[in-house]
Amino acid sequence: MNLLNDFQVSIYVASIVAFFLSTLFCFFIIRINKNFNSKSNDQKRLNSLNIVPLGGVAMALSFFISVRLLGQADSNVVNVSIFALAISILGVVDDFLNLNWKMKIVFQFLFVSFPIFLLNQTINFEILFGINFSGRLNYALTILWILVLMNSINFIDNMDGFAAINSSFICIALTALSFVFNQNYLADVSFVLLFTILGFTIYNFPPARIYMGDSGSLFIGFIFGFISILFDWNPTGQSYLYSSIAPIFLFFTMPLLDFSTVFIHRIKNNISPTTGGTDHISHRLLNQGLSVKSVLLLFSLLNIFIFLLLALTIAFESMSVIIFLIYVIIILTLFIKFQKLEPLN
């Protein structure tokens, strides 16, 4: 352990290593599992179920190794990377055994709550809401926050490259925010995670040869969740408004649009929201004649637009309410538009 702490490379070298390892691990996983045959045929999916869903394992291993190369990394970040690797293994079990959703939530709760109590790190919701429950509400809502993040990334993993592209933009935004507010160790972690995802994206870009699976979506959501806990969203100490808006911009725009569109459609049609299907936003756009790559380009542009809104919110904090209202209007307009599009059959 001491040897790893003494050995240190630059963030650029660590990121290149993360990219190389992620690419290499994905390559070997594909080669080893070239005759992979999924037994999970109980859900309707857009793509072949016989593509190996172990991209998350490649990313988790690459991230864990690369973060350790940063040398005297923050101890919280090191511990988070260990638990992230563990939750990726949980995702592998789910991918192959197709666990009941209730059982998955129980295991996710245990994997999330333990490091939160161990690290004693939470988001201070009590200050935000102006109440005092001696930190108990902070623990409960922080656990819920990370669980929602993990499952929201899992929810948008419904088309080749879709979750990877959206997650990459979140990493870029987190890197920029952390750098601007002098939280450099979190900027480094976000940058390493970005290159880890990019290495995977090479093989996940359409037509995909590997899926991230639950091992990948849980891993990425887990890292996002703990970065959001460790990040100081209110460095000026003056306003909690943008600190509550910024995470929405970063994490929830794409999943919120997708989840709300799918959830309402399934409730109206007496379909279980927990099953897989081809009624996601990406599928609806494909049904309109767009190609997979066109859909990825469209959401890349939307991510860039959201990033600009986030930058404006921080640069002009006094106008954050107006910017947020503009954001809400745009999202509601898109939601209504997507609701009217027919699912892909």
Image (cartoon, rainbow, N blue to C red):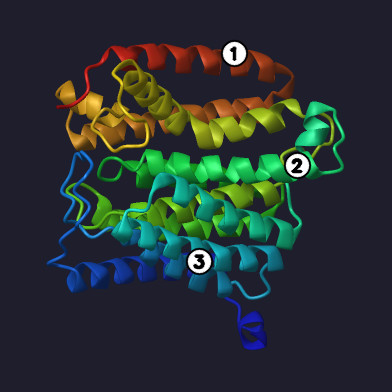
Q: Amino acid at mark 1?
A: Leu
Camera-side mark, 1 or 3: 3
Q: Amino acid at mark 2?
A: Asn
Where does the C terminus fall, quadrant-wise? Answer: top left
Residue 307 at x, y = what percent? 51, 32
Alpha carbons under labels 1 and 3: distance apart: 39 Å
Identify which residue is drawn at 59% across, 13% down. Answer: 325
Name the one closer to the observer, 234 or 97: 97
Q: Any mark on residue 120, and which?
A: none
Q: Are marks 1 and 3 in contact (CB under 8 Å)?
A: no
- State the residue position of label 3: 86
Residue 176 visible to an observer of this rendering: no
Identify which residue is drawn at 23% across, 25% down. Answer: 285
Q: From this view, report whether residue 169 is shown above or below residue 27.
A: above
Mark 3 residue element = helix
Identify which residue is drawn at 32% across, 23% down. Answer: 266
Q: From this view, report whether residue 145 is shown above or below residue 34.
A: above
Mark 1 residue element = helix
- State the residue position of label 2: 138
Q: From this view, report whether residue 264 is shown above or below residue 140.
A: above
Alpha carbons under labels 2 and 3: distance apart: 24 Å
- State the residue position of label 1: 325
Camera-side mark, 1 or 2: 2
Q: Are marks 2 and 3 in contact (CB under 8 Å)?
A: no
